[in-house]
Amino acid sequence: MTDTVTDRFLRYVVVDTQSDPTSNTQPSTEKQRNLGRILVDELLAIGLTDAHLDEHGYVYATIHSNVDKPVPVICFCSHMDTAPDFTGTNVKPQVLRDYRGGDIRLIGDPQQVIRVEEHPALRDQIGNDIITSDGTTLLGADDKAGLAEIVAAAQYLVDNPDISHGTIKLLFTTDEEIGRGVDKVDLKKLGAQFAYTVDGETAGHIEDETFSADGVEVLIQGVAIHPGFALGKMENAIKIAGAIIHRLPKDIAPETTSGRDGFIHPTGVSGSMDKASLGFIIRDFDEAGLAVKETMLEGIVKDVMAAYPGSSYTFTVKHQYRNMKTVLDGHPEIVDHAVEAIRRAGMTPVRGSIRGGTDGSRLSFKGLPCANLFAGGHAFHSPLEWVSRQDMERAVKTLVELAKIWAERA
């Protein structure tokens, strides 16, 4: 178990699997299938004979039950894609063995430094082996750490048939980072009753709550005219868009909020004098909070537009995902079993909330209640991303213990 999870992780991260939000295909990038094929080969090699890659790029596999009593079928899930926020091409993983503390300067770009002051979780890693990129790419621990941990746990269970467990389904998804991770999942084929995404951060953490999320698109129709004849007539859509952005409340933004505070976040702006488009994401742990923020944003748009009587706008809200806690509260055993597994794996369990979403959010509302387990990575979506070998090993042990607990308590 010790070497396997790290070896697998180092193999997976060098495969470029960034998803593409501008693509309309599933998967959004064909290169995600490259990792999918590797995963299928490895799962077949350890004895999961039904492992396969489907037409949407998903990987399915089964660890069959070895007990003669009914046990709820559980699923372990991770995603294969990495975020489009920062390049994932030509990843060069670096292993810093026996970390002795202090800042970590990345060799490919000395300007990239993982500073202890900004990453206090490093203080808990003294003596551990830290894996980073070289600073010119992201690492891909989100969520290739989860993939490696699930495959390593599967191998451990197969290699140790004396460990009693029920049927365990494995699901590796595409396009999670662009919000489409479970769009094409066949839940009937999967056949699980409960699930865990292995996509969290700090070792020992389990999360049963996410943001609720909407997207908003604002389209502005301005008044275009030749600049030489524009006096009293032109209404520049670019300037209107800029005025809206300028009016956004600074205390309701990702960079100024934490804990259970939600935010309004502009994600894109484009346009010309004639037309402009603004994209926003709205986040809050409560749906009522989403509605308040959406009303606030539209109020800002209306106020700005009042100064441009010849122009018009549309304001479109798009449902994204909802807080999975409303589903998980009806199935407390999902979290209770995970808390015990984390404890048996030698850690102090920490229950928390995700300031974001996972495949588990949407799986829960599609009828597969799903909590989120730690994978051990930190500083996701950036060149400062890192994970420790020991935390990945703890995740493997947690998954093995979790399989045992579901069988024991069935």
Image (cartoon, helix red, strand yellow):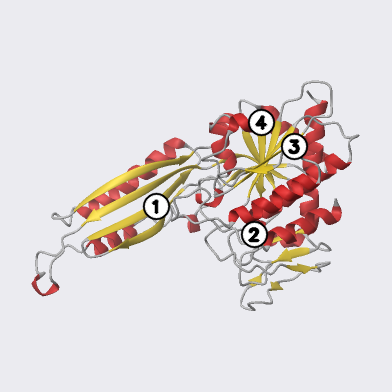
In the displayed structure, 72 sits above or below 285; it is above
Residue bearing mark 4 = 194
Residue type marked 2? Gly
Looking at the rendering, which quadrant does residue 235 occupy?
A: bottom left
Residue type marked 3? Val
Residue bearing mark 3 = 339
Circles 4, 3 touching at the beta carbon (< 8 Å):
no
- The numbered disc on residue 29 is none
Circles 3, 1 touching at the beta carbon (< 8 Å):
no
Q: Look at the numbered disc 3 and give the secondary structure of its residue.
A: helix
Residue 172: x %, y % from top left: 64, 45
Q: Which of the marked residues, 3 or 1, is nearer the chain's N terminus? A: 1
238 or 169: which is nearer to us?
A: 169
Residue 170: x %, y % from top left: 69, 40
Q: Look at the numbered disc 2 and give the secondary structure of its residue.
A: loop
Does residue 291 appear in this view? yes
Residue bearing mark 2 = 140
Q: Residue furthest right?
A: 162
- The numbered disc on residue 280 is 1
Residue at (74, 57) in percent of width and height:
9
Q: Look at the numbered disc 1 and give the secondary structure of its residue.
A: strand
Residue at (80, 29) in percent of width and height:
65
**Front label number (4 vs 3):** 4
Spatial distance from mark 1 to mark 2, Cα to Cα?
26 Å
Residue type marked 4? Phe
Residue at (61, 72) in percent of width and height:
136
How packed mark 4 is, by other alpha carbons closer than 10 Å (few <14, some 14-19, many 20 or more), is: many
Q: Look at the numbered disc 4 and give the secondary structure of its residue.
A: strand
Q: Which of the marked residues, 4 or 1, is nearer the chain's N terminus? A: 4
